[in-house]
Image: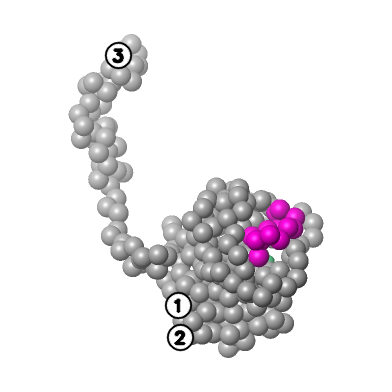
Amino acid sequence: MGAMTTQIMAQQPQQPQPQQQSVQPPQQQRQQMKPEETEDWSRRPAIVTPGKYGAPPSDAIILYGGPQDIVNWVHENGSAPVKWTADSALTVVPRTGGIKTTRSFGNCQLHVEWRTPSVVSGTSQGRGNSGIFLMGLYELQVLDSYNNETYYNGQAGSIYKQHIPLVNASLGPGVWQTYDIVFTAPKFQTNGELLKPAYFTVFHNGVLILNNVSLRGPTEYIGIPVYKAHESKLPISLQEHGNPVSFRNIWVRELE
Ligand code: MG
């Protein structure tokens, strides 16, 4: 029980009062209260040192900051080492398959920087396509959506085939872009039924593009998504879609 609740309860009279007195208008109630009664001292926020310009804050888990961090990733089938190019950035090698983190995550704040190829080739879904799959299931689309029309719930910043981004904040091909993601994992009852869906809030290059949107289920290329109960934490995966998209400065903060 928080300090605020304790203090308010301590204020309450021992004996039941006539209804006229217990139902006071809020303004009258306020006049009888002390400022301390609405102070909450129950949870002292941890001190976190912010990073500059998207750099990881002091309590982040680094998923990719350079070639040494390739150990945090495996092929999507679980095998290692991954076949993507791992230098200052992690770059898709076409036809080698997607990759996923060795660690599992549920609710989290995720920062990812990504870059589509500077040499533009392909159109629509074929141009700079990759994706960030939270829990390996829920895709935030990565695509070159700078002067590249495709179905709107499939462009950069979409939750693939479920949510159109509020705006198109895309920078050009060959330019580093950022996603700052707040993800809430879905919850399931013990009988496997959905209790709460997954939610995404996303900033693209600092611009809010998805505001606490709920998902209908895992990402599907064909058909209507349907939730299937799964673990409360699962690896984050990056999609290989045939285009040499690069990633860097990937870090995550676990949330309750
Ligand atoms: Mg994709």
Residue behind mark 3:
21
Q: Nearer the viewer, residue 78 or 145?
A: 145
231 or 36, which lies in front? 36
The magenta segment is 144-156
Marks 2 and 1, how far apart at CA = 8 Å
Q: Mark 1 points at which residue?
A: 65
Is residue 191 visible from the viewing direction of this image? Answer: no
User: Is residue 238 found left or right of 11 in the rendered image?
Assistant: right
Of residues 163 and 37, which is closer to you in this image? 163
- Residue 68 falls left or right of residue 211: left
Q: Which residue is drawn at 28% across and 21% down?
A: 29
What is the magenta segment's predominant secondary structure?
A: loop
Residue at figure coordinates x 60%, y 48% from the top left: 166
Q: Mark 2 points at which residue?
A: 68
* In this rendering, position of residue 241 left or right of residue 80: right
Residue at 27% of width from left, 32% of height from top?
Answer: 9
Q: Residue 157's image quarter?
A: bottom right
Q: What element carries label 2?
A: helix
Does residue 68 appear in this view? yes
Q: Which corner quadrant of the figure contains ligand 1?
A: bottom right
User: Are the residues tagged 2 and 1 within 8 Å (C-beta)?
Assistant: yes
The location of residue 199, given as percent across then percent down, is 57, 52
Of the image marks 3 and 2, the number of the one nearer the N terminus: 3
Quadrant location of the C terminus? bottom left
Instruction: Classify mark 1: residues with Cα within 10 Å, few (<14), some (14-19) or many (20+).
Output: some
- From the top left corner, tell me how far across and down residue 137 is, in percent: 64, 64
Going by the numbered disc 3, the residue's amino acid type is: Gln
Kind of element beneath mark 1: loop
Q: In this view, does 25 lie above or below 210?
A: above
